[in-house]
Image: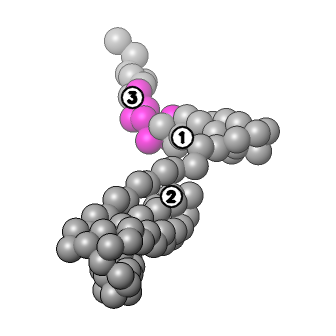
Amino acid sequence: MKKLIASVAVAALMATPAVAAQKAATTSTKTVSTKSGNTKATTTVSTKGDTTTAKTTMTKAKPKGHKAKKAKKHAKKKSRKATKAAAPKKATDTTNG
């Protein structure tokens, strides 16, 4: 996640001089999109005159469909099995008294 944010920031800084080099009277905008795993980040750099603004938005994809439900159920089942295996077993008393 930190790598993604850093790469978006670098892309925005790289885009700034190119955008600022255009005429000062007009507004120019450059958009850079990056993706890492299921997270997507979009950075928009706008320049007008001496003012440059950058806006970054990050969105995370949500699981969809049957495969996602099946994967969730599978993970839940595995977790339950792991919890059972890790649980301490009760000691049995075999002495006759």
Q: Separation of disc 3 and disc 2 at Cα? A: 48 Å
Q: CA distance from mark 1 to mark 2?
A: 25 Å
Residue 77 against residue 1 in the figure, above or below? above
Q: Say which mark, if any, is on residue 39.
A: 2
Range shown magenta: 84-90
Residue 2 rendering spot, x and y as whole percentages: 32, 67
Q: Which residue is mark 3?
A: 91
Q: Earlier in the sequence, mark 1 or mark 2?
A: 2
Residue at the image point whose x is 34% and y is 59% from the top: 55
Quote the CA–CA distance across marks 1 and 3: 24 Å
Q: Residue 34: x percent and y percent?
A: 50, 70
Mark nearer the N terminus (1 vs 3): 1
Q: Tell me the element at label 2.
A: strand
Which callout, 3 or 2, points at the residue further toward the start of the chain? 2
Which element is circle 1 on?
A: helix
Seen at 49% across and 51% down, the residue is 59
Q: Which residue shows up at 55% across the image and 35% down it?
A: 80
**Is 13 placed left or right of 62 in the picture?**
left
Q: Nearer the viewer, mark 1 or mark 2?
A: 2
Instruction: Find out whether the residues at labels 1 and 3 contact each other: C-beta distance under 8 Å.
Output: no
Q: Disc 1 residue type?
A: Ser
Name the quadrant of the C terminus: top left
Q: Which residue is mark 1?
A: 79
User: Where 31 falls versus 39 (above or below)?
Assistant: below
